[in-house]
Amino acid sequence: MDILNGVALESKPCPLGCETDDEFILTGRDRLFNLPGEFTVVRCKGCGLMRTNPRPTPKTIGFYYPDNYGPYLDTKVTVNESIPLWKQLFGKAFQFNMTRLPLLKIGRMLEIGCAAGSFMHKMAKEGWEVEGIEFSPKAAENARALGYRVHTGSVETAHEPQQPFNLVAGWMVLEHLHEPILTLQKLHRWTYPDAWLVLSVPNMDCLGFYIFKDAWYALHLPHHLYHYTPKTLRLVLEQGGWQIINVFHQRILNDLIASTGYFLQDRGFKNKLTQAFINYPEKAGWKSSLLYPFAYILSLFGQTGTMTVWARKLNDYRKT
């Protein structure tokens, strides 16, 4: 085990059990908070899965998740909060595929990485019985304040549910997990035979990553421990007992704008415009629709920076 600026690091082999070597892809750093450290991304020569290696351990990764981590703040709600009319109309006019769900009968939902609870709150108002799992104690407490049952910690440390779930959702979560396959296997046990798993992850097989490499906004080192393409995501899900039914490439290009800001910043252009580019994903709001036609076209070719997948249980699956 290595130590980097007081943070313990661990090296792990490919979780799919490949016995081949890795190839170096890039070295990057924390760009969200400028915390110290450089991190290497490698690709397994056997299956193609990319991962951050070495990486912070489960006990030390919290150093890179301060309380002002974006998703913790963006998902805060109050019990009586209503969605403004413009947001309702905006959501109907533009299908960004960010939290797209299959048509489902109302039942029990688990959200992994629920942050402060906004998606759980939305689903609860639609009649769902919801529970969550959240790594951040402060974000989990905010979600519990809304009246929802939330486990603080990882999926690995969570107890068996009292009843199975019909739906498991995880928005930009799987790439953060130290043990994604073990987590998927656990979720397989926790769900009904006809359950759905809905996830969103960055797409490494996209134009943005090819152009910007370590300056790609969606890379998020060292928060993202695994870096998926549609192919490697399918392999990991199948190993965990799930089969992909649909892949929806999200129709949004905010990451390209922020990546342009990082690219310019790396070359000495440190001004208000560059910073505005970097902050664009957090502040875009309705302005995301301005690039929607271009994002729509790129999504048809699988070339936007994030994807949402729907998966069903492999009910003849047996853990090996």
Image (spheres, grey):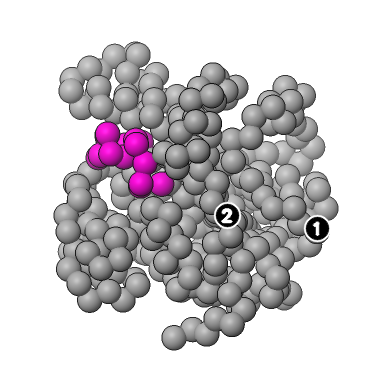
One can see residue 27 in this view = yes
Question: Residue 160, percent across and down?
Answer: 63, 77
According to the image, label 1 marks what residue?
106
Give the numbered dot on residue 246: 2
Q: Residue at x 35, y 14 (%)?
A: 273
Q: Is residue 83 magenta?
A: no
Measured in 3D between alpha carbons, the distance from the residue under mark 1 to the one under mark 2, in whole angstroms, is 21 Å
Prevalent SS, magenta region: helix
What amino acid does circle 1 point to? Ile
Give the numbered dot on residue 34: none
Res 165 quadrant in image = bottom right
The outermost residue toward the top is 272
Q: Nearer the viewer, residue 96 or 58?
A: 96
The C terminus, quarter of image: bottom left
The N terminus, quarter of image: bottom left
Is 302 placed left or right of 121 in the picture?
left
Question: Residue 186, percent across and down?
Answer: 54, 74
- Find numbered disc 2 in the image and state the secondary structure of the residue it sits on: strand
Q: Residues within 10 Å of mark 1 (few under 14, many from 20)?
A: some
Region of the chain picked out in magenta, as a range:
203-217
Q: Residues within 10 Å of mark 2 (few under 14, many from 20)?
A: few
Question: Residue 143, percent across and down?
Answer: 65, 50
Mark in the foreground, 1 or 2: 2
Q: Earlier in the sequence, mark 1 or mark 2?
A: 1
What amino acid does circle 2 point to? Asn
Is 262 placed left or right of 190 in the picture?
left
Res 211 quadrant in image = top left
Q: Residue at x 52, y 85 (%)?
A: 318
Is 73 placed left or right of 125 in the picture?
left
Q: Disc 1 vs disc 2: Cβ atoms closer than 8 Å?
A: no
Q: Nearer the viewer, residue 61 or 108?
A: 108
